[in-house]
Image: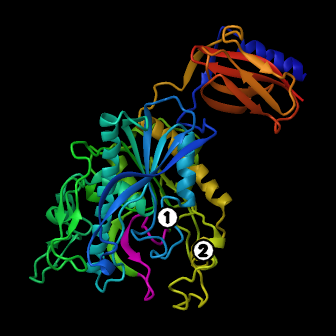
Amino acid sequence: MKIRNLLLLLALVLSVNWTWSQDRYLDQVFDEVSVEENVEYGSNYTVLFAPTQGQTVLQPLLMDIYEPAGDTVVNRPLVIYFHTGNFLPIQLNGQVTGTKSDSSAVEICTRLAKMGYVVASADYRMGWNPFAESAAERTLGLINAAYRGTQDARTCIRFFKRNMVESGNTYGVDTSKIVLFGEGTGGYITQAVSTLDEYNEIIMTTMPVGKFTADLTGDGNPDPMIIPQVNGDIYGTSVGIAPPGADPVPAGDTLCISNHEGYNSDAHLCVNLGGALGDISWMEADEVPFISFHVPLDENAPYESRILNVPSPQGPLPVVEVQGSKLAITKANELGLNDVFAEVDDETTDAAKEASAAAGHDYLNGLYPMNQSVNMFGRVDGAPWAWWEPAIWDTIPHPTAGMGSIPEDATYHDVASFSNPNMSPEKGRAYIDTIMAYYAPRAYLALGLSDSTTATIDLLTKEQVSLVIAPNPSYGQMQIQTGSDSPMQAIGILDVTGRKLLERKLNQSTFAQIDHSTIPAGLYLLEVFFEDGKVVEQVVFR
């Protein structure tokens, strides 16, 4: 029966043409990823060290670039990923996450690269005082930190556009297809960049009116918390100089310099895992589609509209009212920004509809509620996709140890576990499975990645490409070689049902070795893909 099935399958694939599913950008089609770490995409001044050094410091802005290993395509969509962290360095933020190397960031960036994207996991400037005495001071600090983050994100976009024009497109990206993908605090950045395109929008907020103004000079009149001459423009393409009274920054100190002038800062799709929008009035009809993943009971970032609180030894400190994913996606749908997703009607849509019902509302196109309940500690996990290494964080005492209900010997791992007590790589990856499955078809449409998901591939003979397969039958390892003028693009192994058991992309190679030791003994089909078609041969594994 197995031999007959294989012969039927072989007869099918040996027809004149074979329709081969092109799953790039929809599924993981690469086995390996190459990562170039700490690529400098710009530099700018940070206030982070001002309390100790008495001045701002010029900081290199760094990113890790993930690419599918062996990819021959040179015009690929780009994802720029921004990590979480409350705009404070890891440990100072009281958390176990907050770098471009967080487990969830590495996992998501790797998966996107295996789907065929180029991915830049970018850092950004940090620094503000969440424990300032008044809510106005805390809001001033946070809005300035978020503003610097949006400037840096736009600097990163311009780096790639400048690189394409002036440096030969080193990373092989299509700068007309750029995704901003933010996790936690990074979600504030991606949503701000995708909506805030005029300085006046910061001043003319609606929920509540003028929330980003305060009496900073003591004259009884509201002053803007952001001033282009002080902070630089919203794109990070002008100089900003600190005024008197900008403690702890001295008057005349530099707050912003320009990077990559002459290139636009446009992106084409916004994705957020948590986070929030600074003000819903920023979103207008000429902006990009939005995809949001959000825990409805998130304690840190509101699902709808709420005053953002930051934790402190004295308890939660109110900062500023922001709008979460439910309100943002509702408005995106009202404005027609997410109409492009309408034709996606698959199991991810059904799952998102069920999750929406559980969250108490109708499905909103582009929103996936990631429902979590109150746990044994009376907390809610706002980032179920995240995990960390306990052995590292269980040796570092937490600064809130002994305060309130926090045990005196509490470590960073202990405190983080209050929100995510069943944290594990398996749990985090399961949530990321959902995130990728929902994201992929919608990004595919939003970016216009292809008009078709299938292509017709001509069948070749092994003589045409000088194909040699040895040994056959083989025991664990099989070598494949072709002529010098017939480099291979990919290879695949199919079982008797036509199910693909192995797929590997090759970098125009004339030699490949397959390790099939994990595949049961039997009869299989080997597909070898070339620029002009493919060869299909029967192979035997012992």
Q: Is 509 located above or below residue 379 in the figure? A: above
| Marked residue nearer the N-terminal end (1 or 2) | 1
Q: Nearer the viewer, residue 333 or 383?
A: 383
Is residue 510 or residue 332 the one in the foreground?
510
Q: Against 382, is 5 above or below?
A: above
User: Residue 352: x, y in percent?
Assistant: 54, 50
> Badge 2 local density, few (<14 within 10 Å), some, or many (20+)?
some
- Decide if residue 354 is in sight here: no
User: Quick check: 149 above or below 511?
Assistant: below
Question: Could you tell whether 93 is left or right of 205 in the image?
Answer: right
Can you give x and y, in whole percent of width and height, for residue 117 in the image? Answer: 49, 39
Residue type at mark 1: give it.
Pro
Q: Secondary structure at mark 1?
A: loop
- Magenta segment includes 311: yes
Which residue is labeled 1 in the image? 296
Query: Which is more foreground, mark 1 or mark 2?
Result: 2
| Vertical arrangement, residue 472 with respect to residue 245, above or below | above
Q: 245 or 39, which lies in front?
A: 39
The residue under the point 44% across, 80% down is: 311
* Mark 1 to mark 2 CA distance (whole Å): 28 Å
What segment carries the magenta color?
298-316
Q: Give the number of the disc on residue 77.
A: none
Q: Residue at x 47, y 45 (%)?
A: 119
Residue behind mark 2 = 393
